[in-house]
Amino acid sequence: MFVPPLLALPLIVYNLMALFGFSDGAAWAAPIATISMVSGGVWDLSVGDVFIVVSLVLLFGEILKATRFGNASVVDHMLSTAVFVVCLIEFLLVGFAATSVFFILMIMALIDVIAGFTVSIRAAARDVQFGGIE
């Protein structure tokens, strides 16, 4: 069963949010909750923090998907690479993407690409038999 790249979802959500008012770094830093810690410190949870945490969970799902074999995995690697390329181009050329939140999203897309190819290569190396030796 084909599942599209999960990291395409945060990319789409980021772009939609940028179109509807989250077009600068200050909007992503706006606190949505303030939590008093036992230590006496205060933790401000921002929109960007929540966005990054959700994206990290999706990255975990992408790495799990990288362990699959077959034609679908090749297509998945190609689409993950395309998501990274879109992120890179957008980060370099689009003004509202010049935020730390988007940069971290782009790095997650890069990790997805590298992890996907690494897992596939390592799994393929285990399946290779040399000279009839098992």
Image: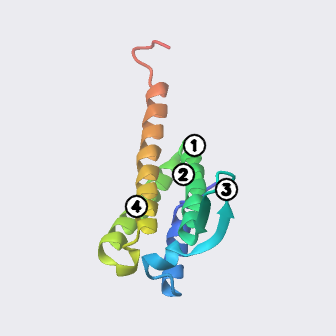
Task: Tell whether label 4 touches label 2 (CB within 8 Å).
Answer: no
In contact (CB < 8 Å): disc 1 and disc 2: yes
How far apart marks 3 and 4 lie (CA) works out to 37 Å
| Of 46 and 44, the residue lying toward us | 44
Q: What label sits on residue 37 in the rendered view?
A: 3
Q: Residue at x 58, y 49 (%)?
A: 60
**Quadrant in the picture for the N terminus:** bottom right
Q: Residue 71's spot in the image, x, y percent?
A: 51, 48
Going from the N terminus, do you reach mark 2 or mark 4 first?
A: 2
For residue 72, which numbered disc appears in the image?
Answer: 2
Residue at which label 4 appears: 84
Mark 4 residue type:
Phe
Q: Earlier in the sequence, mark 1 or mark 3?
A: 3
Mark found first going from the N terminus, 3 or 4: 3
**Of the residues under marks 1 and 4, which one precedes in the sequence?**
1
10 Å crowding of disc 3: few (<14), some (14-19), many (20+): few
The residue at 59%/57% (across/down) is 58
Reading the image, the residue beneath label 1 is: 68
Seen in the image, is 67 located left or right of residue 118? right
Work out whether 18 lies above or below 46.
below
